[in-house]
Image (cartoon, helix red, strand yellow):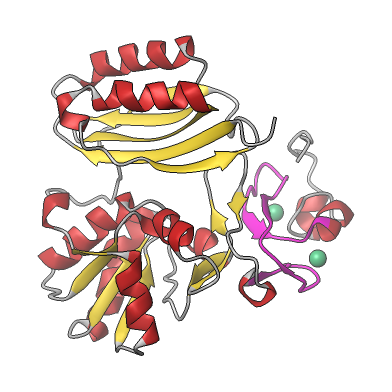
């Protein structure tokens, strides 16, 4: 039953006056149609990832597009082998993406850059800066060629990162994230801070790697579902950007440290993972409070 499942990733900033009632109906719809995933709703709009059998996902897309405010929503799709989530969650959020800054209007963000345009910039050797807007642990296992990988524990660090980017204020700056939603706010903030030449990759990494694998994306793409990592490239030299924390072998694999008090995400090869009991250090290995072992 290969490729009988599909995963879709989507978001749309669109004013919702009553996200609570939308949430209830939405959750019911998803349960009834056997979908699994995570969807966030807020007065700002919707953001989610859903998996299911192809027919159920197709129906879901039509269902969501049936709401006028979501009629032009863009679904980034890929095939997968199974459900990529174990459950269905629909959650209410104050903001879809929390940066800790008020009054950021995604409609006033950076210019959109199509994957083909980015490829051209690389190929012509244009003078531009490319910045990862994701968390550092995501960027470590994969990123665009020559990308700046800021120190970011979460998206609330972005305003600090923008201060560090001041030195590039006069250059073209391209930002990217997984599906595009973080860049909508990240670039809107930059524009607000006076950056003039800011771009965001349309549809994010998801869109780029589908069109141009084995080019300027290097390594794996971190995903927030059971697949953990998507590896789009086939050329060995473009497969891995990270190395095992213990032995230095190139890999795109990571785990959360099984010491519950640590829980740090770290890059590790599967051999070292087993040798070190899924822990990032001898101290963590010695901890009496470890996560029960799953099949991963
Ligand atoms: Zn190793
Ligand atoms: Zn640890």
**Magenta portion: prevailing SS class:** loop
Instruction: Judge whether residue 256 can be spotted in this image.
Output: yes
Residue 128, percent from left and from top: 30, 83
Q: Quadrant of the C terminus?
A: top right
Residue 107, percent from left and from top: 12, 51
How many discs appear?
0
Could you say which quadrant of the image residue 176 lies in? bottom left
Q: Quadrant of the N terminus?
A: top right
Q: Is residue 86 magenta?
A: no
Could you say which quadrant of the image residue 132 lies in? bottom left
239 up-or-down from 293: above or below: below
Q: Residue at horizontal 61%, vertical 58%?
A: 231
23 up-or-down from 187: above or below: above
Left or right of 231? Residue 73 is: left
Q: Residue at horizontal 72%, vertical 45%?
A: 259
62 up-or-down from 278: above or below: above
Q: Front-most of 283 and 112?
A: 112
Residue 239, percent from left and from top: 64, 68
Q: Which residues are magenta?
A: 242-270
Q: Residue at horizontal 44%, vertical 61%?
A: 211
């Amino acid at each position: 039953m290969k490729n009988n499942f599909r995963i879709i990733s989507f978001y749309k900033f669109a004013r919702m006056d009553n996200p609570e009632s939308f949430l209830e109906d939405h959750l019911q719809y998803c349960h009834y149609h056997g979908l699994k995933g995570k969807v966030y709703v807020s007065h700002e709009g919707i953001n989610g990832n859903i998996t299911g059998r192809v027919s159920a996902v197709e129906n879901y897309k039509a269902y969501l597009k049936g709401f006028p405010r979501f009629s032009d929503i863009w679904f980034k799709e890929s095939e997968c082998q199974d459900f990529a989530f174990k459950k269905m969650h629909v959650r209410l959020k104050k903001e879809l993406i929390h940066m800790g800054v008020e009054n950021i209007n995604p409609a006033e963000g950076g210019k959109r850059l199509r994957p083909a345009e980015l490829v051209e910039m690389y190929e012509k050797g244009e003078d531009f800066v490319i910045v990862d807007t994701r968390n550092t642990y995501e960027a470590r296992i994969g990123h665009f060629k020559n990308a700046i990988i800021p120190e970011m524990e979460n998206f609330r660090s972005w305003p600090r990162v923008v201060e560090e980017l001041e030195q590039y204020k006069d250059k073209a700056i391209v930002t990217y994230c997984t599906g595009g939603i973080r860049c909508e706010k990240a670039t809107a903030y930059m524009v607000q801070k006076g950056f003039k030449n800011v771009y965001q990759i349309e549809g994010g990494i998801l869109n780029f790697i589908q069109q141009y694998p084995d080019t300027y994306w290097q390594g794996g793409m971190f995903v927030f579902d059971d697949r953990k990592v998507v590896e789009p490239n086939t050329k060995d030299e473009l497969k891995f950007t990270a190395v095992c924390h213990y032995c230095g072998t190139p890999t795109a694999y990571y785990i959360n440290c099984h010491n519950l008090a640590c829980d740090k995400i770290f890059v590790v090869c599967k051999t070292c993972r087993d040798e070190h009991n899924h822990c990032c250090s001898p101290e963590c290995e010695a901890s009496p409070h470890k996560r029960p072992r799953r099949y991963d």
